[in-house]
Image (spheres, rainbow, N blue to C red):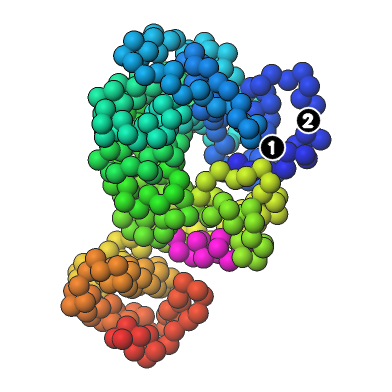
Amino acid sequence: MGGGSLRRFYRQHDLLNSSLEMKKALWMAFQSKEYGHDFPCSTIPVVDFCKALGLKTEWNRNGLEQIITGQVSTREDLSKLSLVDVRNSPYLTPYIKCVSVFQTLSEKPVGGACFGPLTLAGAILGIEKLCLDSIMHPAFLKEIVCIISEKLWVMAMACEKKGADFFWIAEPVAVMISPTAFRNFSGDYIKKIFTSISVPGFLHIPGNTNYLLNELVMTGAQCLSLDSHVDARDAVYKLPRDVVVLGNINAISMLQEPLADIERQVTQLNRAIRNFPNFIISSGGGLSPETPEEAIRLLFSVTGRFPVWSRIEYSQIDTLWNSLIADKEILSLISKNRFSSAVIKAAWEEAATCLTRRLKSKKMKTEEVEAKWKNLMKLLYSDIMKNIEIVDIDGSSYNKNQLSHDLNS
């Protein structure tokens, strides 16, 4: 997500007389070509969206433009806000036009993008007031979120009309609130936006969103962008197979850590999710402009070295490992189907990992796990797995006696 050398980009392009939509499209095309970005999107900044609503801004001491809080405090203010037509706003149209301009430069999918209704409400009210209003004045907060989401719906429809392949919503403020508050003040409104467009909805919320995963699914998002605080493998265990997970290499690591450490992280992530088709490797959040090019290239090059299964093999692995932990008769299932030894091995490793994690997280009692281990051990010592080597996530291999001892422990 994002990142890249601005200096080299400016050397390649003369942007003096270029429109904003052309500059943005060229930058996204540069990222796609130079580093391998597959899902660039044209994101409307918070400040530009709020200026399109007629709100005033100021520059803080760090040189950043921000919305002056206190401009929306009464229902009369809300009424004025609801009457604003954002369709032809000069603050927003360049980001919409950028979608079709990009399509003249690249064949990769491109999305429209904006920040979510709760995040925009936080910029308008101030974060402290937003948090207080969610408890003390929920009706007022719902009104402002409803008005904002209607404007976002207009943007989503406009981006789709321009040819967007998906629509991305980033809702960072959501990580500060409870699942119920998220549903009431954000999730229900995002769902209305995603269900009203025909292209996939992408939803990004940074930070530790483990407690929000079920609510994120309820928004109807077809792709969830998760931060490094979420364990990727646990996430794909929990989420439906028709929901794609995007993530989640630590963006700060990409900025600050040695390349060897980044390569280790990317390798471990690819190993962790290698048996799941519904995963896209990415940073866990937007990359700083200072992120070294070498770090970005490394993320793509390391990932590119990992083999992928065919659609049929992914389906077979999913069926097998779920059958193993469900105590189903696995040997007869295997004998009736043509599963390769590689597929059987992958399914065994996935079942063993899932059971181990459930035990460690206390989501399954010890006696339940012991009962399910019997199914795994029955398969491990069968003729089917006679010549199959079991490999741990760190790349080390086990002999069966050692593995049996470890599992019993």
Amino acid type at mark 2: His
Marks 2 and 1: in contact by CB < 8 Å? yes
- Across and down, in percent, residue 271 comes to 49, 65
Say which residue label 2 marks: 13
Residue 235, position as x, y percentages in the image: 37, 55
Q: Residue placed at 50% from the left, 22% from the top?
A: 68
Quadrant in which the N terminus is drawn? top right
Q: Tag 2's secondary structure?
A: loop
- The overriding secondary structure of the stretch rendered in magenta is helix
Query: Can you give x and y, in whole percent of width and height, for residue 125 in the image?
Result: 41, 26
Residue shown at 50%/58% (left/top)?
A: 308
Amino acid carrying label 1: it is: Phe
Residue placed at 30% from the left, 67% from the top?
A: 361
Q: Is mark 1 on a helix, strand or loop?
A: helix
Which quarter of the rendered picture does the C terminus lie within?
A: bottom left
Most foreground residue, 244 or 132 = 132
Q: Name the residue under label 1.
A: 30
Magenta region:
263-273
Residue 132 visible, this angle: yes
How crowded is the residue under tag 2: few (<14 C-alpha within 10 Å), some, or many (20+)?
Answer: few
Across and down, in percent, residue 234 comes to: 36, 60
